[in-house]
Image (spheres, coloured by chain):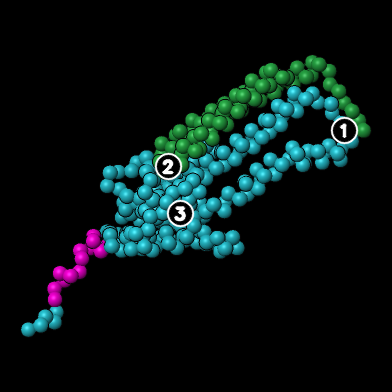
Chain colours: A green, B cyan
Amino acid sequence: MITQTFPGTLWLIAKLFTLLGVAVYIVFAGVMVRQEHLMANVLEEGSEAILRILTYIHLALAIGIFILALIIL
Amino acid sequence: MPTLFDSANHSPPINAQQKTTANTTFGAGSEHTPMTPLTSFAVHPDSVRFETQEEQETVILFLRQHFIVNVPWILIAFIIAIAPTVIFPLVTHILPISLSIPIGYIIIGTALWYLATLGFVLAKFLGWFFNIYIVTNERVIDIDFFYLLYKKFSEAELNKIQDISFTSGGIFAAIFNYGNVKIETAGEAPNLEFEMIPFPERVVETIRSLTEGLPNSI
């Protein structure tokens, strides 16, 4: 069994990349919220509220993970 | 003297006939399908309104692709969801490498993994949910969204429709009764294709009955 350990500098770079990745994901989640609004303007059929709530939950989770990453990494 | 031959007073005018035919196609007049988030075929849905709908325009058919088209991405999402608990431990057990990863990265990595899975499911479901076909008493409409960012709105007025046909082939299409409906139009109006919709023969019959009596009808 080969065990590998990385130096502290490498973990700092990993942290920066992780934060950058989560930040990009937040943008994606925001685009999804915006797009759901645009789509719901095209079609009203009664179930859009559920989808809207889900997209907001998705965005909130993404922001939550970013904050968590800032704290624990 | 009894009347042997009567005038055409008893036969309704063409427009009335047309409405009667349209409303009685597969009981469409009395049938009102309740809408749920997973509805893919609805006759006279009550709560549906779309962007460019006019005052006197009523929705007769509301269609999405058959729900079966979602099965591949649902399976992919399921595999992605079980990967951290089943596949990854299996891979690390087989490979002779052990990485000492700090617990913080494991927590954030796992959380991100499941968040990305949720994002994947949401994006796929939104794509299916808002990719719709509508038949009204005036026109046929196809609304498509691509990759969440691009929207395509195509429509053809009923009196522009020249030919309508459907194809249904394959084991799954036969089992779940879905197919493609092709609507060819006159002039510069674009041809429309309803892809993988449920009950394609009912859709063709309904559109055909709506166009009967119209100028240039099929």
Closer to us: A41 or B105: B105
The image shows residue B167 at horizontal and vertical percentages of 50, 61
**Magenta-colored span:** B6-18
Viewer-nearest of labels 2 and 1?
2
Numbered badge on residue B208: none
Earlier in the chain: of badge 1 and badge 3, it is: 3
Viewer-nearest of labels 3 and 2?
2
- Determine which residue is flagged by label 1: B97
* Element under disc 3: strand
Q: Is residue B159 above or below residue A15?
A: below
Q: Is residue B151 magenta?
A: no
Quarter of the figure with the C terminus of chain B: bottom left
Q: Specify the amino acid type for callout 1.
A: Ile
Closer to us: B47 or B179: B47
Q: Residue at x 75, y 39 (%)?
A: B85
Protein chain holding label 1? B
Instruction: Give the alpha-carbon distance from disc 3 to disc 2, as whole Å.
Output: 15 Å
